[in-house]
Image (tube, grey):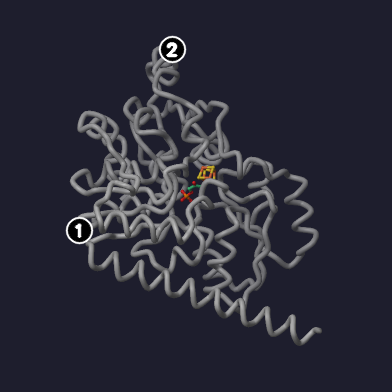
Amino acid sequence: MYNIINYMHTHFLTEAFIMIRDVQDEIIRLKKENDICILAHSYQGHEIVEVADYVGDSYKLSVDASKVTNRNILFCGVHFMAETAKMLSPDKRVYLANPLAGCPMAEQMDAAMISAIKEREPDRKVVAYINTTAELKTVCDVCVTSASAVKIVSAMEDKKLLFIPDCNLGAFVQKACPNKDIMLLNGGCPVHAAVTEEEAREAKALHPKALLLVHPECRPAVSELADYVGSTSGIIKYAKGSDGKEFIIGTEISIIEHLQYECPDKRFYALSKKIVCQNMKLTTLSEVYNSVRSIAADDGEAFEIKMSDELISKARVCIDEMLRLGG
Ligand code: 13P
Ligand code: SF4
């Protein structure tokens, strides 16, 4: 009995891997033949990362998007990221692999709400996390990502700021920039903010030799227990470069998968089973395949990001400012 189950397990798994490889090969062929560049956020699964031309955190992908020379960009991530790529490469056709993949934090505040606060606080510059809609970006002064927030806020001459929407990232920036007066609102990432201080203490107790690495979207009480707080790429870089052998990862679960591939001699544990971004997980390899096939056929099925020239020019101002100050 054991042998039959064992045989079937190995056999089916091998077939599944061959199928994945076949789909990946077809995606690679289609993207090369049809001048498509694939950008994937690091929260995508490894099978998608393997077919991408550029992989990284929000900041790196923004810089990459501004340099792409291909006619078509296929974004594997969430809506605001594809929108940012469109703003940075307005003459390209930019597609999002799954049209339903949005970031709930990006929808928490809108331009009318922030404009009303600006009227009451006219001397504050508005710093917007890149996880915001293009419409909201039109009333903001500068964008930041988790990797660039401290550098950009430090480089700003203004002292009085309004940081939106993530109050946890905002608190992290305030701590790193004590000379600034940063007003925060009650927004944030429902995935990272769900992790409690108690869970962080339990994870540390369970893995006493492990270093705790967390994303600044986590609550300050969680970040305070961490050995390192940083963006997705910051966490990856830290874990790869560290002499440590065990790490508790306090960001989206895909990062554990990528790190385990890159560092087979190290061990990675999830800080909490809750840190799964369902929106990032909406993109599957079959959606990537269907998108490249539709882009190749130009049959109108792939989800293309459409924005007016006026919206692009107004929303892009704070992204250009981010690239200027963060570069
Ligand atoms: P990064 O800025 O680290 O890419 O994070 C983006 C994000 O959506 C985190 O939840
Ligand atoms: Fe948005 Fe949080 Fe998902 Fe990042 S992890 S895309 S901030 S919901």
The mark closer to the camera, 1 or 2, is: 1
Q: Position of residue 322 (x, y in %)?
A: 33, 42
Under circle 1, the secondary element is loop
In primary-sequence order, the first of circles 1 and 2 is: 1
Q: What numbered label is drawn on residue 69?
A: 1
Q: Which mark is residue 247?
A: none
| Residue at 57% across, 38% down | 168
Amino acid tagged 2: Arg
92 sits left or right of 245 in the view: left
Instruction: From the viewer's side, name the closer residue of 313 and 286.
Output: 286
With 88 as the anchor, is 264 left or right in this view? Answer: right
Q: Secondary structure at mark 2?
A: helix
Q: Amino acid at mark 1?
A: Thr
User: Residue 220 appears in which quarter of the rendering?
Assistant: top right
Q: CA–CA distance between discs 1 and 2?
A: 43 Å
55 to 184, vertically: above or below: below
Relative to 72, is 220 above or below? above
Residue depicted at 27% across the width and 50% down the height: 299
Mark 2 and ligand 2: say if the CB distance to the nearest ligand atom is below 8 Å.
no
The tag on residue 120 is 2
Question: Which residue is farthest top?
Answer: 120
Relative depth, front residue between 41 and 214: 41
Label 1 near ligand 1 (CB < 8 Å):
no
Q: Nearer the viewer, residue 185 or 3?
A: 3
**Which percent across, then down, holds residue 99?**
42, 43
Residue 58 is left or right of residue 178, and the answer is: left
Question: Which quadrant is home to the N terminus?
Answer: bottom right
Front residue (pair 168, 97): 97
At 42% from the left and 14% from the top, the residue drawn is 116
